[in-house]
Amino acid sequence: MQELSKAREQNLRGLALFAIISRFREVDSEMPVQQMLCLVWVANNEGKSQKELRDSLGMASSTASRNLNALADYHRLGKPGLGLVEMADDFRDRRQKVVRLTPKGRTLMNEVLNYVIAEAPSSLRKVESEILFKEQRRPA
């Protein structure tokens, strides 16, 4: 039963992660996971530098720039950026850029956080009860 409980917990966590990724994909249906990681990092580290993001996420400079630009105003594929983050010169070192959420980015991250805190537990409990129901009906 312990293994079943652990498997159920992993399943529920996977469903929650899927729901969060789906919300990001509503903003951009082709948003890569690296951009999602950058966005979440910026939300948790506003005002820190692009270099700190690179170091923290283990990204190459070009990868971080490409993903942040797509989250900001410029996408390298010629389409507009998402307008979720902004980059500004670091007043301590003009060679560096600091990153922050835009109001649009803050709204999105608040929606995701509200889902995780409020909605996910109830919807996941529903899924969990459905799993339990199926397990109880399964022949031994």
Image (cartoon, helix red, strand yellow):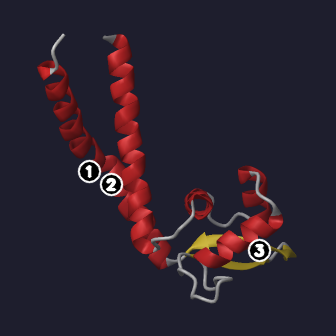
Secondary structure type for disc 3: strand
The residue lying at 59 percent from left, 57 percent from top is 37
- Foreground: 42 or 137? 137
Q: Quadrant of the N terminus?
A: top left
Name which of mark 2 and mark 3 comes first in the sequence. 3
Q: Mark 2 or 3, which is nearer the eye? A: 2
Residue 35 image position (x, y, % from top left): 60, 64
Identity of the residue drawn at 40% across and 55% down: 20
Amino acid carrying mark 1 in the image: Glu
What secondary structure is marked by label 1?
helix
Quadrant occupied by the C terminus: top left
The amino acid on which the numbered mark 2 sits, given as a three-letter code, is Tyr
Residue matched to label 1: 119
Q: Which residue is mark 2?
A: 115
Residue bearing mark 3: 97
In the rendered image, residue 64, in percent from the top left (x then y), is placed at: 73, 66
| Three-letter amino acid code at the position of disc 3 | Lys
For residue 13, above or below residue 33 = above
C-alpha distance separating marks 2 and 1: 5 Å
Q: Can the viewer see residue 107?
A: no
Q: Is residue 128 left or right of residue 106?
A: left
- The answer to whether residue 97 is left or right of residue 133 is right
How many marks are shown on the rendered structure?
3
Q: Position of residue 62 (x, y in %)?
A: 80, 69
Q: CA distance from mark 1 to mark 3?
A: 35 Å
13, 72: nearer the viewer: 13
Q: From this viewpoint, is residue 94 visible?
A: yes
Q: Nearer the viewer, residue 102 or 30?
A: 30
